[in-house]
């Protein structure tokens, strides 16, 4: 069983709730049209799933997550939007769907957390219909940049890499997506990259509060302590560093993401 480095604390879902097709899956948008059947793997609180569902309605949409924790929130989001989406607990390595069941299979920030992303891509391709598309997007923490420099944020980035890799995951996933697709036998692939950038006072407060909370009260913090990779004092200093960054008028953050559109 894979270990999700972030977990589902509210400080984590706070950032997930911000995600939409426009800011997190724009590379997929041109392939969407009404009537397509779509599977969203790792749906979390469902904001991207609901946005996708609005674009493919009346197509069938299923969102799955490894945990039931965020699914009630996802169902409420779909109800508010007035779109028909089914949300279920699911396993990307063993999808509960027949071969050729969906026109679009989407996964945002999922492969980086898996011990076997190649197997996951093969399974996603299995349930995708011929002529359909598998779409994946993942951050690359090795291309994560903050300003101004802060030793506490350097400690955080190093610790994040070590915690994720202790879980058998790959935090620098963005640069590896193409190689994983090739290893899965998928060759009709279009690779691209886009970024998140947080620099306004509102964005800094939102992201800084999210990571200050995660540093001390989340699965990431629990794993860092349990694996002996950090002390509570070090986690408290990381949280303080994120608060300093969020309050700095010059604060800037950039995150590179790799993306693939895979034709099946």
Image: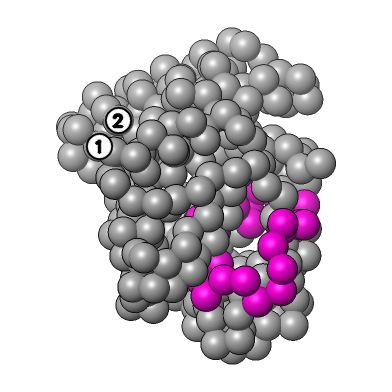
How busy is the neighbourhood of tag 2: few (under 14 within 10 Å), some, or many (20 plus)?
Answer: some
216 is higher (above) or lower (below) than 206 = above
Secondary structure category for the residue under label 1 = helix
Quarter of the rendering occupied by the N terminus = top right
Q: Which residue is mark 2?
A: 206
Q: State left or right for residue 133 relative to residue 4.
A: left
| Residue at the image point whose x is 69% and y is 62% from the top | 97
| Cα distance between the residues tagged 1 and 2 | 5 Å
- Find the magenta span and give its range: 93-115
Q: Would residue 159 be seen by someone viewing this image from the given angle?
A: yes
Q: Quadrant of residue 81?
A: top left
Marks 2 and 1: in contact by CB < 8 Å?
Answer: yes
Residue 15 in percent (x, y) is at 39, 36
Quarter of the rendering occupied by the C terminus = bottom right
Q: Quadrant of residue 25?
A: bottom left
Residue 258 in percent (x, y) is at 50, 66
Residue 119 in percent (x, y) is at 77, 65
Q: Quadrant of residue 256?
A: bottom left
Viewer-proximal residue among 25 and 53: 53
Secondary structure category for the residue under label 2 = helix
Is residue 124 highlighted in magenta? no
89 is higher (above) or lower (below) than 126 = above
Is residue 105 highlighted in magenta? yes
How busy is the neighbourhood of tag 1: few (under 14 within 10 Å), some, or many (20 plus)?
Answer: some
Viewer-proximal residue among 134 and 127: 127
Residue 145 in percent (x, y) is at 41, 48
**Circle on res. 203:** 1
């Amino acid at each position: 069983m894979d270990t999700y480095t972030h977990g589902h604390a509210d400080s984590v879902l706070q950032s997930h709730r911000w995600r939409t097709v426009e800011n997190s899956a724009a590379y997929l948008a041109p392939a969407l049209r009404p009537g397509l059947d779509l599977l969203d793997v790792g749906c979390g609180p469902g904001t991207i799933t609901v946005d996708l569902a609005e674009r493919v309605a009346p197509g069938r949409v299923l969102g799955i997550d490894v945990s039931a924790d965020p699914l009630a929130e996802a169902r409420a989001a779909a109800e508010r939007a007035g779109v028909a989406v089914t949300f279920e607990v699911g396993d990307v390595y063993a999808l509960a769907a027949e071969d050729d069941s969906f026109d679009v299979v989407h996964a945002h920030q999922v492969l980086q957390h898996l011990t076997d992303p190649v197997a996951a891509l093969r399974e996603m391709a299995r349930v995708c219909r011929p002529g359909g598309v598998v779409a994946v997007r993942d951050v690359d923490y090795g291309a994560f940049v903050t300003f101004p420099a802060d030793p506490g944020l350097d400690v955080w980035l190093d610790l994040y890499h070590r915690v994720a890799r202790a879980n058998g995951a790959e935090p620098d996933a963005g640069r590896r997506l193409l190689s994983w697709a090739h290893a899965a036998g998928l060759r009709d692939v279009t690779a691209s990259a886009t970024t998140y950038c947080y620099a306004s006072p509102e964005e800094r407060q939102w992201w800084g509060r999210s990571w200050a909370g995660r540093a001390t009260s989340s699965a990431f913090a629990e794993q860092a302590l349990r694996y002996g990779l950090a002390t509570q004092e070090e986690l408290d200093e990381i949280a303080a560093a994120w608060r300093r960054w969020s309050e700095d008028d010059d604060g800037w953050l950039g995150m590179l993401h790799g993306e693939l559109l895979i034709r099946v």
